[in-house]
Image (cartoon, helix red, strand yellow):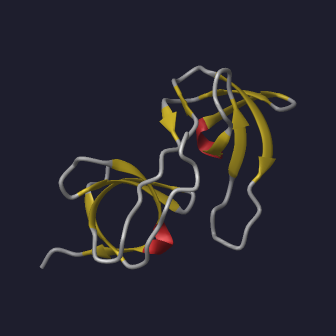
Amino acid sequence: MENNTWLVISSHRSEYPEPITFAKGTPLMVGERYEGEEDWQDWFFCQCAGQQGGWVPAPLIEWLDKGQARAREDYTARELNVQPGDQLIGHRKINGWIWCENAERTASGWVPLANLRELHEA
């Protein structure tokens, strides 16, 4: 856990109202690798029983055989909606994103690292 403070420098809004969420050991069907201009390396579109698919970072995927995998740990693809000026507490960086909580600790989710600037204590 990092627990660093971050300042939002550009807004982010989730495009996925029903993020994929699963527990460690959940069987996954792995699809396409994310290809975009952002520096979001090694994200794969995965599906699991009973919910819509979503993007999962490669380090959380235990590859088994030809598109079959299982989850290395608990995960949710929930994204945090943020506005410039918001302060966040960052916990874990992975593949161009960081898991954050708002300052009030009432909401949490993933935010693109490019939308944030780390605040250093004086």
Q: Residue 37, position in %: x, y?
A: 71, 73
Given residues 1 and 13, the one toward you in this image is 13
Residue shown at 48% from the left, 30% from the top: 74
Residue 104 image-quadrant placement: bottom left
| Quarter containing the C terminus | bottom left
Residue shown at 28% from the left, 70% from the top: 86
Residue 2 image-quadrant placement: bottom left
Given residues 101 and 13, the one toward you in this image is 13
> Please, which residue is most extreme toward the left here?
122
> Please, which residue is most extreme toward the front here?
17
Residue 41 image-quadrant placement: bottom right
> Please, which residue is most extreme toward the right here?
66
Given residues 73 and 103, the one toward you in this image is 103
Q: Is residue 66 above or below residue 96?
A: above
31 sits to left or right of 2: right
Q: Is residue 63 above or below residue 90?
A: above
Residue shown at 63% from the left, 63% from the top: 40
Q: Residue 36, position in %: x, y?
A: 73, 67
